[in-house]
Image: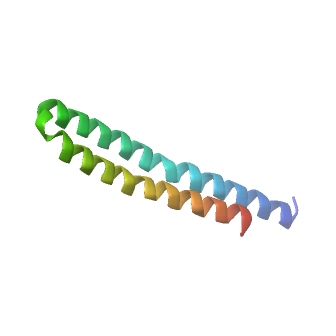
Amino acid sequence: MDVEAAHEFARLIGAGLAGGLGAIGPGIGVGLIGRGALEAIGRNPEARGPIMTNMILSIAFAEAVAIYALIVAILLVFVA
């Protein structure tokens, strides 16, 4: 295997790992946020509005991490 092929291989493996591992955490986080919000609404249906607002805000912060991982993966594929 020559140096160029090794560089290409490492770049693509790095991009795949960055995208895949960077999406696992936010995916688990969004699931836990949704579960917690549904449990809270089940216990106190009158607080649905504030719970939903906080849930959506928390999901947005969790998804931002996945977007950063996607950007890193794209940079690795096209720039590195």
In the rendered image, residue 53, in percent from the top left (x then y), is placed at 26, 49
Name the residue located 88 percent from the left edge and 63 percent from the top edge.
2
Which is nearer the eye, 48 or 75?
Answer: 48
Query: Which quadrant, please, contains the C terminus?
Result: bottom right
Name the residue located 17 percent from the left edge and 30 percent from the top edge.
42
Looking at this view, name the residue that lies furthest to the right. 2
In the rendered image, residue 52, in percent from the top left (x then y), is placed at 25, 44
Q: Hey, which quadrant is residue 72 in on the image?
A: bottom right
Query: Would you place residue 73 above or below residue 51 in this image?
Result: below
Looking at this view, name the residue that lies furthest to the top. 42
- Name the image colouring: rainbow
Name the residue located 36 percent from the left edge and 50 percent from the top edge.
59
Which is nearer the eye, 41 or 80?
Answer: 41
How many circles with numbers are drawn on the protein? 0
Looking at this view, name the residue that lies furthest to the bottom. 79
In the rendered image, residue 74, in percent from the top left (x then y), is placed at 65, 60
Query: Would you place residue 71 above or below residue 62 in this image?
Result: below
Q: Hey, which quadrant is residue 9 in on the image?
A: bottom right
Which is nearer the eye, 57 or 18?
Answer: 57
Would residue 45 be found to the left or right of residue 57 on screen? left
Would residue 25 be found to the left or right of residue 79 on screen? left
Query: Would you place residue 5 above or below residue 26 in this image?
Result: below
Query: Which quadrant, please, contains the N terminus?
Result: bottom right
